Image (spheres, rainbow, N blue to C red):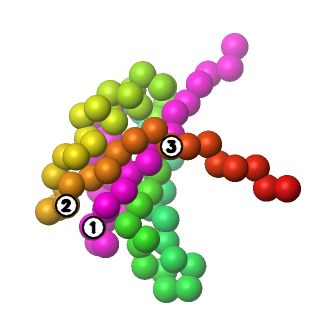
Amino acid sequence: MVEQTATVYIGNLPWGTTEDDIAGLFGDFGPLLDVRIIQDPRTGRSRGYGFVELASPGNATKAVSALNGAAFNGRALMVSNARPKPRRQ
């Protein structure tokens, strides 16, 4: 049996947010498999969004419900289920 995971999109992140900050925020919703803040490759600066991979879709749904619109370091987070990455051809 293949275990399912779920990826959550987090937008409107403050520039100084670290992956550890995000892990602390999402840690209450179950085991985290991956945390990524997307950075501009030229400057290394955060682009203001990232992704969290949770161990179960149910935990991801709970996290989205609880954290979408939540205040985090002075900003309202935008949290939703991530769309699948398009295949490269």
Point out the frontmost of discs 1 and 3. 3
Tag 2 and tag 1, C-beta contact below 8 Å: yes
10 Å neighbourhood of mark 2: few (<14), some, or many (≥20)? few
Residue identifier under label 2: 75
Residue identifier under label 3: 82
Distance from Cα at disc 2 to Cα at disc 1: 7 Å
10 Å neighbourhood of mark 1: few (<14), some, or many (≥20)? some
User: Residue 53: x percent and y percent?
Assistant: 49, 41
Name the secondary structure under disc 2: strand
Q: In which quadrant of the rendered image does the C terminus lie?
A: bottom right
Distance from Cα at disc 2 to Cα at disc 3: 20 Å
- Is residue 53 something one can see in this rendering? no
Going from the N terminus, do you reach mark 1 or mark 3 first?
1
Q: Which residues are magenta?
A: 1-29
Residue appearing at x 56%, y 85% in the figure: 42
Relative to 75, 39 lies left or right: right
Q: Is residue 56 magenta?
A: no
Q: Is residue 10 magenta?
A: yes
Residue appearing at x 69%, y 13% in the figure: 1
Residue 76 image label? none
Q: Quadrant of residue 72?
A: bottom left
Residue identifier under label 1: 14
Going from the N terminus, do you reach mark 2 or mark 3 first?
2
10 Å neighbourhood of mark 3: few (<14), some, or many (≥20)? some
Distance from Cα at disc 1 to Cα at disc 3: 19 Å
Tag 1 and tag 3, C-beta contact below 8 Å: no
